[in-house]
Image: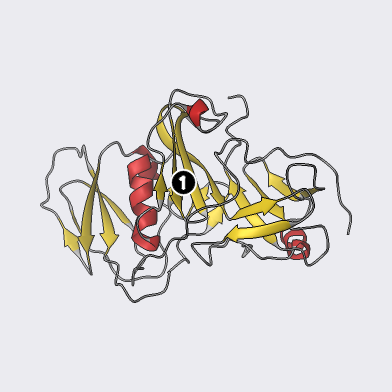
Amino acid sequence: MKRIGLVLVACVAFAACAGGDDSTAAQPTTTKLTLLPAMTTTTVPPTTEAPRESELVHDTTTTIITATTTATTTAMTSPATTTALIVPAIPADTEPIVEALRLSDDGIGAAVFTGEPEGVIAYLSSFIGAPTGDTGWVDPFEISACSGSELRIVSWGGLQLTFGDVSKVLQGRRHFFSYIYGQYSFDGVATTQLDATPPGLLTVEGVGLGTPIIEVESTYPGLTINPADDFVPPNFVVNDNFRGFVAGLADDSPVVQLIGGPNCADPT
């Protein structure tokens, strides 16, 4: 298996690449996410896929409505100024429904990069429960090397989403611009998976935590694989918006972390 040696500096934008609280949360029985203009009428049918709707990224005000099968609002003819986000009720005895939360180089499911923070957080929470950690809006240099005037990291166990007002995908307002899935430790020799929650999240091509590096190579022909250095384990780069870390360079070495979105330490 041919290896190409380039050094990837990843995770510098985040408070830590390892560690994270476990998250145990109730899950939904439906995964239909419907974005509709305020004061309109809509029905939320049961399904197993949430649509990728670009409108999510432009919301400035979000109203959360909990419903089990349908939700309606009174129709109006005037232009909408508020978006209603219909969030399915979350029964306490169901397994995570993750089909809708496919990881990609432009976001997680319908939560695309540039998405309005509160709408993105509500969307993820409707599938995997309330966040286990939230820094709130702080000066970027308190927790990262990111640009901009404010930054926020929200976590669900081993899944971290980063929001800010400046990134390579958008400038000038608060938005979602990157995620990290999976937390690990690395002592310069061995890599240990610390947190793989919420379980079962996969890319649209089926790559997730634990996927052997040989399968990653066959899934993404032309990717770059870099050896470990003193600070991080071996890693791979698919493109500027998708990369990851693996436990070693053997064919069966598993993926221990997936990263989507631009590195916030990069100049904008």
Is residue 179 among the parts visible in the rendering? yes
Q: Is residue 190 left or right of residue 55?
A: right
Q: Is residue 89 left or right of residue 246?
A: left
115 vs 236: above or below: above
Could you say which is closer to the camera, residue 85 or residue 95? 95
For image coordinates 43% across by 61% down, the residue present is 23
The total number of labels drawn is 1
**Residue 28 on image: x %, y %:** 34, 68
Q: Is residue 12 left or right of residue 155?
A: right
Q: Quadrant of the C terminus?
A: top right
Q: In the rendered image, which quarter is residue 34 located in? A: bottom left
**Residue 79 on image: x %, y %:** 19, 37
121 vs 252: above or below: above
Q: Is residue 46 left or right of residue 177?
A: left
For image coordinates 78% across by 67% down, the residue present is 252
> What kind of colouring is applied to the model shown?
secondary structure
Is residue 55 among the parts visible in the rendering? no
Residue furthest bottom as drawn: 93
Q: Quadrant of the N terminus?
A: bottom right
Which secondary structure lies at badge 1?
A: strand
Q: In the rendered image, which quarter is residue 152 located in? A: top left
Q: Residues within 10 Å of mark 1 (few under 14, many from 20)?
A: many
Could you say which is closer to the camera, residue 79 or residue 213? 213
Q: Say what amino acid the circle numbered 1 marks.
A: Val
**Residue 179 on image: x %, y %:** 53, 46
37 vs 146: above or below: below
**Residue 32 on image: x %, y %:** 34, 63
Give the residue pinned by disc 1.
Answer: 112
